[in-house]
Image: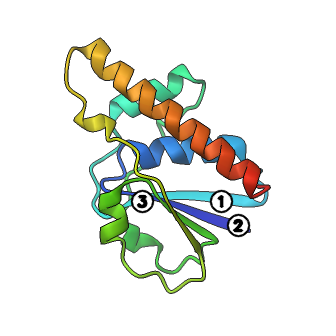
Amino acid sequence: MINILVLCTGNSCRSQIAHGYLEHFTNQNSVKIYSAGVETHGVNPKAISIMNEDGIDISSYTSNNVDEYFDIEFSYVITVCDNAKERCPFFPTKAVKLHYNFPDPAKAIGTDEEVSEQFRSVRKMIKEYCKDFVEKNKL
């Protein structure tokens, strides 16, 4: 089994969106996706809504702390924000560590529609990243 951890600051938006797309694009029989934060902020309702627009249901996902996963041997650890990369604790693993700093849609300001558009923009970036990652690694 290939275990993939997506790590963010609060495990509320970016890591949850990436978790959803990685599950969508990978073979569920051979790949297990986890997401966590260096803190836990709860899954952002706007992330759930924005993923539903693309046909992916993340409403059952939970916000988890990275400390919960120290006993899992990961093949890949993907940090999706600079803060998580800097604060990521040492994993006693041979996991390939990857990093991409996506903008934080939870910090979006403006009208409800403007905030939604910022979430959609980040969702699109994460979707493309995840699809490319899965294709390159033949997952």
Camera-side residue: 92 or 59? 92
Q: Secondary structure at mark 1?
A: strand
Camera-side residue: 20 or 60? 20
Circle 1: residue type: Lys
Q: Earlier in the sequence, mark 2 or mark 3?
A: 2
Q: Which mark is residue 36?
A: 3
Circle 3: residue type: Ala
Q: Which mark is residue 21?
A: none
Badge 2 density bin: few <14, some 14–19, many ≥20, Cα 10 Å = some
Q: Earlier in the sequence, mark 2 or mark 1?
A: 2
Work out whether 1 lies above or below 89: above
Instruction: Tell me whether circle 2 and circle 1 mark residues in contact (CB < 8 Å).
Output: yes
Q: Residue furthest left?
A: 110
Q: Which mark is residue 32?
A: 1
Q: Residue at x 29, y 56 (%)?
A: 40
Q: Where, quadrant-wise, is the C terminus in this rendering?
A: bottom right
Badge 3 density bin: few <14, some 14–19, many ≥20, Cα 10 Å = many
Instruction: Tell me whether circle 2 and circle 3 mark residues in contact (CB < 8 Å).
Output: no
Q: Residue at x 65, y 59 (%)?
A: 32
The reply to whether residue 17 is in sight is yes
Residue 24 location (% of width, % of height): 67, 40
